[in-house]
């Protein structure tokens, strides 16, 4: 761990944030003085309760009878990944570092439902085949006015002009410039952390933005997406607005997605295995797409993890409703952009911005892997609107959990411990949601039925 000690000394770090993504993609962990962090690197000194990894988004835990949670909580041990250490750029007066950690039991085995470990497990399957997945996420998010009462609908914030955005401004440059000071902070913070972002654009909704990332290895890009969400939220708060990655924050407006571009390289030669030299799709590429087509509906708890997620997946709202695929077709779940053979890729348009990037990447890569292993065949590419075809993706979290639990192929890839833990957490969240009475119900049912 000499690299970590050198980094802390070079940057005169006073505190270190040891962070781990939980199943929801929320940053959990501990903040330590730098000296105590260094001391904790030896002898399993960095500990955290195992229950953190089965905590629901509401802060509670699954019932004891599920078998994935017990009040007799044991500690697990954090091992910082030295390649992820970064400055926390929004603490200029108190030099602070952050480092992403992996979680292990005392015997050295990984915690099977730690989301970063889940992605690493899937990537090991590719590595054993001599394959190198490459991904590039596109993350959408809304800027909204600070909302102190959750019962009130969200609304766009006031920009530099002094007015709210009321009409849709897709790709509007001036609409982005309304929030220039905020995005200057975002770019500065990302540069300080080595987060390799690329293009910023205004999306369809009011004050809805999209940030594209440059392509790279799946684990590195998941780390960057995880840190980017935290970064944008912090930048928003500095400018007195919320930045939200909620899948469907505003009624009547498009939801926010996390499109995942993915290609496959030969690990030794770096050749793109999805296209021939003449630009034709390879059989492996078609098998990969077929795997996505067949298994994406079953991994939806990883791509659309919240009850709100399914409000986004509606026709004519810039989101897919099925797993058809097509060339440069934005109505399908799986779009193949026009490209040179070296850049041949498929874009998974199903995942929501609210998904944990580690689990979303693991899900899409697992589906493609199964497709290649089983040599599946895809449907014919869709020409024209896929919104005219059947809605085959799950419509609710309840349906998604049922399909997730019932897939033998996914259990073989992910392991039953992870499947059981995630299903139990999502069941607990769904049960908590079912106890909430919405304003829609009070409006239309209270005096009418």
Image (cartoon, grey):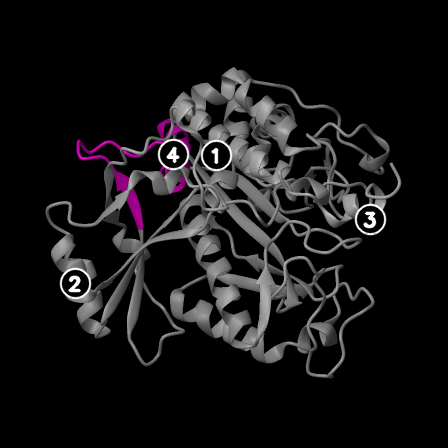
Q: CA distance from mark 2 to mark 3?
A: 59 Å
Identify the image quadrant of residue 93. Answer: bottom left
Q: Secondary structure at mark 2?
A: helix
Q: Secondary structure at mark 1?
A: helix
In the image, residue 260 lies in the stretch drawn in magenta? no
Q: CA distance from mark 4 to mark 3?
A: 41 Å
Q: Mark 1: give few (<14), some (14-19) or many (20+) Cα within 10 Å.
A: many
Q: Earlier in the sequence, mark 4 or mark 1?
A: 4
* Residue occupying the point 11% across, 50% down: 42
Q: Which disc number belongs to residue 5?
A: 2
Q: Nearer the viewer, residue 436 or 27?
A: 436
Q: Secondary structure at mark 3?
A: helix
Q: Nearer the viewer, residue 188 or 107?
A: 107
Residue 45 lies, in percent from the top left, at 15, 49
* Residue of label 4: 113
Q: Which disc number belongs to residue 443?
A: 3
Q: Closer to the camera: disc 2 or disc 3?
A: 3
Do the numbered discs 1 and 3 sit on residues whose CB atoms are within 8 Å?
Answer: no
């Amino acid at each position: 761990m000499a690299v970590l000690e050198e980094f802390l000394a070079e940057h005169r770090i006073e505190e270190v944030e040891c962070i781990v993504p939980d199943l929801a993609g929320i940053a959990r962990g501990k903040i330590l003085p730098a000296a105590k962090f260094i001391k904790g690197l030896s002898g399993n000194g960095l500990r955290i309760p195992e229950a953190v990894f089965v905590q629901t988004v509401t802060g509670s835990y699954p019932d004891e009878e599920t078998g994935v949670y017990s009040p007799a909580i044991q500690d697990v041990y954090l091992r910082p990944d030295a390649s992820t250490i970064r400055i926390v750029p929004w603490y200029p007066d108190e030099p602070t570092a952050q480092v992403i950690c992996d979680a292990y039991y005392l015997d050295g085995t990984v915690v099977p439902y730690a989301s970063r470990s889940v992605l690493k497990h899937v990537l090991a399957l590719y590595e054993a085949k001599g394959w190198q997945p490459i991904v590039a996420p596109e993350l959408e998010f809304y800027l909204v006015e600070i909302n102190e009462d959750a019962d009130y609908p969200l609304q766009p914030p006031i920009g530099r002009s002094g007015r709210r955005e009321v009409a849709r401004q897709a790709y509007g440059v001036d609409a982005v410039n309304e929030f220039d000071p905020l995005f200057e902070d975002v770019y500065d913070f990302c540069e300080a952390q080595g987060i390799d972002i690329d293009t910023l654009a205004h999306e369809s909704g009011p004050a809805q933005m999209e940030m594209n990332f440059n392509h790279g290895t799946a684990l590195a890009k998941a780390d960057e997406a995880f840190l980017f969400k935290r970064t944008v939220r912090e930048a928003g708060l500095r400018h007195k607005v919320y930045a939200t990655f909620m899948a469907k924050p505003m009624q009547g407006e498009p939801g926010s997605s996390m499109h995942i571009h993915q290609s496959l390289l030969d690990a030794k030669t770096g050749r793109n295995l999805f296209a021939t030299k003449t630009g034709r799709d390879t059989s492996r590429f078609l098998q990969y797409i077929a795997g996505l087509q067949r298994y994406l509906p079953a991994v939806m708890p990883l791509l659309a993890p919240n009850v709100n997620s399914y409000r986004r997946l509606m026709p004519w709202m810039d989101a897919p409703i099925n797993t058809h695929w097509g060339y440069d077709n934005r109505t399908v779940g799986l779009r193949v952009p026009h490209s040179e053979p070296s850049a041949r890729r498929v874009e998974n348009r199903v995942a929501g911005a609210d998904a944990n990037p580690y689990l979303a990447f693991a899900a899409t890569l697992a589906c493609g892997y199964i497709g290649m292993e089983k040599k599946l065949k895809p449907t014919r590419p869709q020409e024209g609107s896929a919104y005219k075809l059947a809605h085959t993706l799950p419509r609710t979290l309840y349906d998604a959990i049922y399909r997730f639990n019932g897939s033998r192929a996914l259990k073989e890839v992910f392991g039953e411990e992870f499947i059981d833990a995630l299903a139990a957490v999502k069941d607990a969240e769904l049960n908590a949601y079912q106890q909430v009475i919405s304003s829609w119900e009070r409006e239309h049912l209270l005096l009418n039925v």
